[in-house]
Image (cartoon, rainbow, N blue to C red):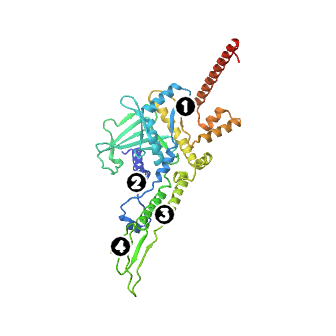
């Protein structure tokens, strides 16, 4: 009997692999040249070069640049926070953060699987979204009912693991499959050695990072079609540049053009025509203008910026340097988009950190874990300082202003206050020493 969860997971994995492969190709700049008609495809079939202007990477990287996760800590527990920091480093999650965020930005989702290895050491790995799938409960869509991962064994068979809160089920295909060959659910059977393993933690060890709770959404949604237009315009411009961007000279002469060479400083000696014949003429055709193509490409890149909420200056340099306030306003749509994404990802980071501690025998509620991202907005130090100064002058406590507008944590505030107290103590000690020295000089009659 075929496992319904296996069948559902397999169908989704096969389906999304095709979509995600395409998204990754566009992000990496491996974009096909798309034509609007079959006739154009035939005409340009002999084009040997591939021209792309990869704006997809700009859209994705503008988001990735603002997704910098701080190492999570545990509220009011320095010892457990230190242990969590060690786990974050030892498992390699500190290095996987970029890959996780990149996967989320390109495909809309990413996965981390955490477990104990054969030596009872905690392991956590980023897994490509094309290898994993999560199935949620229909009644409670926040509850992950089962997760799946498939991969190809070096020997050729395809293996799949189903993760449940109480067990792990292992399956393998009955035969090897060639690259690109898609297995059917009937091709799988339980692993003969250990088809089921207990899950003593009562939680699925697969953590699903999603860009959107309603549906996975790539940052390239709505961008790929316009990217195709940009590439088509660019290809047309390059063809026009190759055949018509230079002036074309012509000569009308009964003597022909033999001996006429187009060299610098060359002087053409043209033979006059006979009386009654076509007059000898020399001239040139104007070069084809490329402005139409450049204007269209500029327009399309602006459309990509509007659709993806990517600021214009990410595509083309602006005249002059914008002020801090102008930069904040220009980047506001991107900043808000990134903050929404951060808010969506943080609960999964909390759950993952809590589970890593649980694997090591430390039970901490995920609500006590405090992951945080660096500020998404571009920070202009002078503008930031003026904002904080204005708030403090308006009556806001200095520490509150630093936390609200500069991202300071409670620990940062405590350290600042301790440094300030130490500085006041040092100044007081110095003042006391100066007064004591002055008093001694006065007592000796040496005062001025």
75 or 135: nearer the eye? 75
As measured in the structure, the alpha-carbon distance from the residue carrying label 2 to the one carrying label 1 is: 44 Å
Within-10-Å neighbours for mark 2: few <14, some 14–19, many 20+: some
Q: Point out the image quarter for the C terminus.
A: top right
The residue tagged 3 is: 293
Q: Secondary structure at mark 2?
A: loop
Mark 3 nearby-residue class (10 Å; few <14, some 14–19, many ≥20): some
* Tag in front: 3 or 2: 3
Estimate the x, y position of residue 155 in percent, counting from the top left.
28, 43
Say which of 83 and 356 sits in front. Answer: 83
* 1 vs 3, front mark: 3
Q: Secondary structure at mark 1?
A: helix
Q: CA distance from mark 1 to mark 3?
A: 56 Å
Q: Splitting the image into 4 quarters, where does residue 205 fall?
A: top left
Give the Cα distance between marks 3 and 4.
34 Å
Quarter residue 436 falls in: top right
Query: Mark 2 or mark 3, which is nearer the start of the sequence?
Result: 2
- Residue 218 appears in view: no
- Comes first in the chain, label 1 or label 4: 4
Between discs 1 and 3, the one toward the N terminus: 3
Residue at which label 2 appears:
30
If you read the primary sequence from the N terminus, does the residue marked by circle 2 or circle 1 appear first? 2
The residue beneath circle 1 is 368
Q: Earlier in the sequence, mark 3 or mark 4?
A: 4
């Amino acid at each position: 009997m075929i496992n319904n969860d296996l069948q559902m997971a397999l169908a989704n994995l096969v389906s999304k692999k095709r979509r995600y492969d395409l998204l990754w190709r566009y992000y990496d700049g491996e974009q096909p040249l798309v034509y609007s008609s079959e006739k154009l495809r035939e005409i340009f079939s002999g084009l040997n070069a591939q021209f792309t202007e990869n704006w997809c990477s700009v859209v994705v990287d503008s988001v990735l640049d603002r997704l910098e996760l701080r190492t999570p800590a545990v509220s009011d527990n320095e010892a457990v926070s230190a242990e969590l920091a060690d786990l974050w480093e030892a498992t390699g999650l500190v290095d996987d953060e970029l890959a996780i965020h990149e996967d989320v930005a390109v495909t809309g989702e990413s996965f981390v699987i955490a477990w104990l290895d054969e030596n009872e050491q905690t392991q956590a790995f980023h897994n490509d979204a094309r290898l994993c799938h999560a199935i949620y409960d229909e009644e409670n869509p926040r509850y992950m009912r089962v997760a799946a991962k498939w991969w190809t064994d070096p020997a050729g068979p395809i293996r799949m693991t189903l993760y449940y809160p109480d067990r792990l089920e292992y399956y393998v295909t009955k035969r090897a499959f060639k690259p690109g060959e898609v297995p059917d659910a009937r091709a799988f059977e339980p692993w003969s050695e250990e088809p089921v393993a207990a899950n003593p933690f009562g939680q699925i060890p697969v953590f699903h990072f999603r860009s959107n709770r309603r549906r996975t959404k790539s940052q390239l949604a709505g961008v790929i079609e316009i990217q195709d237009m940009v590439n088509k315009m660019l290809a047309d411009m390059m063809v026009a540049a190759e055949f018509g961007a230079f002036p074309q000279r012509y000569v009308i002469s009964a003597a022909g053009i033999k001996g006429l060479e187009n060299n610098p400083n060359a002087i053409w000696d043209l033979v006059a025509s006979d009386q009654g014949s076509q007059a000898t003429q020399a001239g040139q055709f104007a070069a084809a203008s490329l402005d139409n193509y450049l204007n269209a490409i500029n327009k399309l890149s602006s459309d990509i910026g509007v659709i993806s909420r990517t600021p214009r200056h990410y595509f083309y340099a602006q005249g002059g340097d914008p002020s801090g306030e102008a930069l904040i306003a220009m980047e506001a749509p991107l900043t808000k988009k990134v903050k929404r994404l951060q808010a969506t990802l943080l609960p999964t980071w909390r759950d993952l950190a809590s589970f890593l501690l649980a694997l090591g025998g430390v039970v901490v509620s995920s609500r006590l874990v405090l992951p945080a991202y660096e500020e998404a907005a571009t920070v202009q130090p002078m503008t930031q300082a003026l904002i904080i100064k204005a708030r403090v002058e308006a009556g806001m406590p200095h520490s509150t202003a630093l936390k609200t507008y500069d991202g300071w944590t409670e620990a940062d505030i405590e350290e600042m206050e301790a440094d300030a107290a130490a500085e006041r103590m040092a100044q007081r000690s110095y003042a006391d020493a100066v007064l004591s020295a002055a008093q001694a000089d006065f007592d000796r009659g040496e005062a001025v």
